[in-house]
Image (spheres, rainbow, N blue to C red):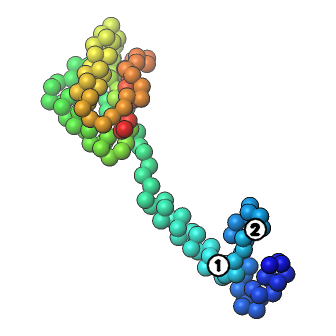
Amino acid sequence: MPTSQAMRMAEEAELDLVVISPNQAPPVAKILNYGKYKYELEKKAKEAKKKQHVVEIKEIKVRYKIDTHDYEVRLKNIRKFISQGNKVKIIVMLRGREMQHSNLAVELANKFIADLANDPITVEKKPAVEGRNVTVWLAPQ
């Protein structure tokens, strides 16, 4: 229908003529209360934002001389973070002369990966020496 006729119908109903999808040929317009329409759009956007999960990066810092119980606790925490849908960054810290034993830190990082092999994870970044740390990135599948 012509735009002038649609505008006249909207004025008679004391409502607004709102273009819903301008990219179509011909553009789709509706006669409705614009304030209410805008409110409904905001409400839908707010609801969608509520339902989305923001992926966080959780850090686990350890030294290469970690005790078995501490190691198991860190492993349990990594499993919990992965199950919540978060990424995990494992940092094996080296201090002072420990830099000579960076191969042991890489072995510890590989041990984490090996122990988590049965879990639904993907290794985003393999163990790598970065300065005084060895880092590994894990993500849920």
Q: Which residue in the protein does label 1 denote?
A: 35
How many badges with numbers are in the image? 2
Q: Position of residue 87 (x, y in %)?
A: 38, 38
Category of crowding for the residue at label 1, using alpha-carbon neighbours closer than 10 angstroms: few (below 14), some (14–19), many (at least 20): few
Q: Position of residue 78 (x, y in %)?
A: 28, 36
Outermost top residue: 100
Residue 88 horizontal side relative to residue 104, left or right:
right
Outermost left residue: 69
Q: Quadrant of residue 100?
A: top left
Earlier-in-chain disc, 1 versus 2: 2
Q: Quadrant of residue 106?
A: top left
Kindly identify the amino acid type of the residue bearing the numbered disc 1: Gly
Q: Nearer the viewer, residue 88 or 9?
A: 9
User: Disc 1 versus disc 2: distance between alpha carbons?
Assistant: 21 Å
Q: Which residue in the protein does label 2 denote?
A: 27
Secondary structure of residue under mark 1: helix
